[in-house]
Amino acid sequence: MKRLWSFGLVVVFASGAAWAAALLPDPAVKPGETAAQPGDMPAPAGLTLDKESYPVTDGSTSAEPLGVWVAARLLGLECAWRSSMFEAQRRLLPMNPGHKEVAALYGARLRHHGTHGAYTRLINGAADLIYECRPPSPDEAKLMEERGVELEIVPIALDAFVFLRHRENPIAELTSEQVRDIYTRSEEGERGRIDNWNQVGGPDARINAYVRNPNSGSQETLKTLVMKDREIVQGRDMMGRTMMGPYNLMQKDKNGIGFTFFYYQRYMAPLSYGSHASAPKALAEVQDEKVEEQPVEMFAIDGVQPSRETIADGSYPWVTKVYAVPRKDLAPDHPAARLRAWLLTEEGRKIIAETGYVTPAETVPTLVPKLSRMDESEITAHGDEGVGPE
């Protein structure tokens, strides 16, 4: 009961003042000078949707900017990056100069409920298409089976799974095996096989390995991509229940290690901790920001620093995929089916790239056939070898 009450409190509060504040531009800033304005860009020629026919989209937290930007480009909305007084996390949101219609559109059709919440909503018919950072978890696959639902899981872009360090941690690089040993539960108990920074060339200090909640996008990716069959360290005092959780825990912990997705770290994580509210920023402004200002930074893995370049060329070891996922039973003329098909075109790929995601050309022409719950062998069989491990 306590957990249900907490969830309800967050939803009600966020749907009121918090979201209103996030959607309203700073009155001291002229939207035309600060906001990315898709309405001023050439309208996409390959797909026409309006506010009434636009599908209900959802997805992971890290993919929300993608969903918002695609909708803004198709519908001619203004949008901008900003944080609010209620959260340090930066978000790409529609600008709302007093129009209730825009706020209603975001709340009803564009807002993301997180990886697990989005899969649940899609399976139960509350969403038409979701943007996801991973395939379904075992729990979600079980729900699909119970509901008799099949999904079409198709990669549309690339991301990377990255590990986080406090900027004052002298260790800036780890090997993939060292990461696994830090997160592999030792036979003695709760600690990892590597549990002190001096075991990897650092100071004599206990390693605090932060984890996420089960079914979150990043926790499931840790399990399937990095750890494989190893038992992961646990510790309820170290568990962050949102994507901001590891940042909140690590901002004052020089001995911590956490994980997230590259896109979230690069574009959505706060640059500093203090006053959360910020003026709206255009997409290009955020892409040009200096990442060294962030108090939490990324480890290089196996000598490779995660970046758009190392994601694109596959040299970073833990490249991941971003998926567009509708239900398989959609009619071909359903707006969500049309949107998903358009995202796989050259025009759709270019608009995805506008958000900062990596969209290598080889992912476009090879994804159309066999749109079902593809596992890794099926994806590889359809020409997706250059995308990286799942």
Image (cartoon, rainbow, N blue to C red):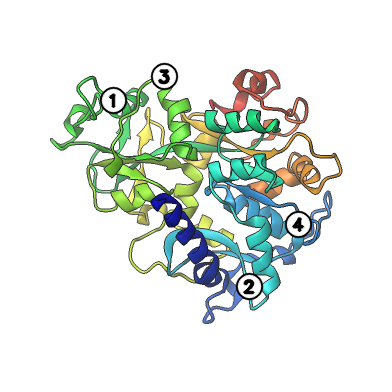
Q: Which mark is residue 41?
A: none
Residue 355 in percent (x, y) is at: 61, 51
Earlier sequence position, callout 4 versus callout 2: 4
Distance Cα–Cα, label 4 vs label 2: 17 Å
Q: Secondary structure at mark 4?
A: helix
Choose between 2 and 353: the one closer to the eye: 2
Earlier sequence position, callout 3 versus callout 1: 1
- Left or right of residue 359, residue 221 in this image: left
Q: Amino acid at mark 3?
A: Asp
Of the residues tagged 4 and 1, which is closer to the observer?
Answer: 1
Q: Amino acid at mark 4?
A: Leu
Q: Residue furthest left?
A: 204
Residue located at (47% from left, 30% from top):
318
Determine which residue is flagged by label 4: 74
- Left or right of residue 321, residue 262 in this image: left
Residue located at (66% from left, 42% from top):
124
Determine which residue is flagged by label 1: 185
Q: Amino acid at mark 2?
A: Asn
Choose between 136 and 41: the one closer to the eye: 136
Of the residues tagged 2 and 3, which is closer to the observer?
Answer: 3
Earlier sequence position, callout 1 versus callout 2: 2
Query: Can you say whether 230 is above or below 351 in the image?
Result: above
- Left or right of residue 15, residue 109 in this image: right
Distance Cα–Cα, label 2 vs label 3: 47 Å
Determine which residue is flagged by label 3: 229
Q: Residue furthest right?
A: 333
The quadrant of the rendering that contains the C terminus is: top right
